[in-house]
Amino acid sequence: MLLQRGQSLLMSSSRRAVMMGKKNIFRTTRSFASGDLVKTALYDFHKELGGDMVPFAGYELPVLYKGDNGGVMKEHLWCRSKASLFDVSHMGQILWHGKDRIKFLEKVVVGDIAGLKPGQSCLSLITNEKGGIIDDTVITNAGDYIYMVVNGACKHGDMKHFKEQLELCRDENLNITMDYLEESMSLLALQGPEAAAVLSKLIPSDIKLESMGFMEKNIVTSIDGIYNCRITRCGYTGEDGFELSIPSVYAESIASKLLEDDRVLQTGLGARDSLRLEAGLCLYGNDLDETTTPVEGVLAWTFGKGGPKARRRNEKGFVGHEHILAEDSSKLQKVNRKRVGIMGMKAPARQNVEIFSEDEKPIGIITSGTFSPTLKKPIAMGYVETASAKAGTDVLLKIR
């Protein structure tokens, strides 16, 4: 065992059913038993490219690729300097229709969905009755419907939760349809400083990507002549980039076309994890779970702009709000622990490593940790007692 010194950094950051009257009809046909792994539309393509396939969120996905530019370190640094292509088709894609779609969604997530302009997206949180986080989700106002992306490992649980909440609203006769796209649409992420230049060559010339702000515009267009493709400027790496929702039957064609550009490298889950951790972004199941509230996770900004004046913080009304916000005001409830980033140790601190105060009192635990290829030093994320969450606080880590 080795107690190593580190320093905390306060974190500021971090997818079918029909209801007609009082009758709920859910049509989510895909399910898989424990141990059965789903293959994305690009499975064979990954294997041809040298993908090292591993189980993840019920799917077989590449953790890295073999070859001259393969491996977590090289793939990570490529994304920071050029453009990387990720298969994130394990994520759940859901469309919400009906005039009451926003009313219902604001019952199950904490974000200001009504305030989204057409094409605008936001990160939000799905909460349970105790204020814990069931999942994080990106929600887009697509005009006459809502487009939602949820985590692959959580999507079936999320939809079960939505079904339960719809049942509780039966007497309200909500006009709403939840359409789970299952495997009909694949999801690719093109990330890195060259992503816009690469993608612009494959889309209609009248679409100017420079006018698409981050999470500010979502369009359905053609990519390499293939229609019904959705482009959202967002991602999970800390880099500029786009998520591309495309018909699965054309996934390999579009992926191949993108990889014809020498600036693009196929990249696996390993680099995706180290990239997101460098950016201070949470991994659900590690850094967030059903026992963690948005306040503990330092994610109160997902309620919307305005701080204490944010509409959702004042109107409340979402599941579990009484465990997150004060009863008689928009103030956040006090919590005993908070999420922080930690640097300064000599060796990587992995998940479940204990965190101690300078006088060696246990104060928390690491939830994610790795060696940062960009910073060339170990980095980590975890939870500490609130009194020790101030940026610059010295801590000790119990690394075995």
Image (tube, helix red, strand yellow):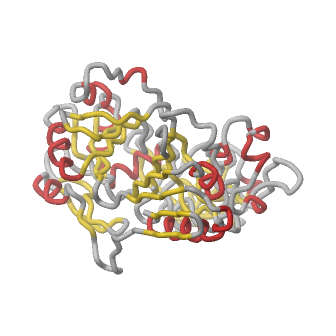
Is residue 156 in view from this perspective? Answer: yes
Q: Residue at x 64, y 51 (%)?
A: 103
Q: Looking at the image, which residue is at 62% across and 51% down?
A: 340
Q: Is residue 252 above or below residue 259?
A: below
Q: Which picture quadrant has residue 134?
A: bottom right
- Tell which of 336 and 400 is nearer to you: 336
Say if residue 6 shows up in the picture.
Answer: no
Residue 321, position as x, y percentages in the image: 74, 58
Coordinates of residue 316 in the picture (x, y in percent)? 75, 52
Q: Is residue 122 above or below residue 93?
A: above
Nearest the eye: 156 or 75: 156
Classify residue 244 by image quadrant: top left
- Quarter of the image where one finds residue 116: top right
Identity of the residue furthest to the left in this view = 48
* Residue at 58%, 71% in the rendered image: 164
Question: Is residue 394 found left or right of 148 in the rendered image?
Answer: right
Closest to the observer, 157 or 281: 157
In the rendered view, would you say 32 is above or below 130?
Answer: below
Question: Percent from the top left, x then y, of residue 210?
Answer: 39, 21
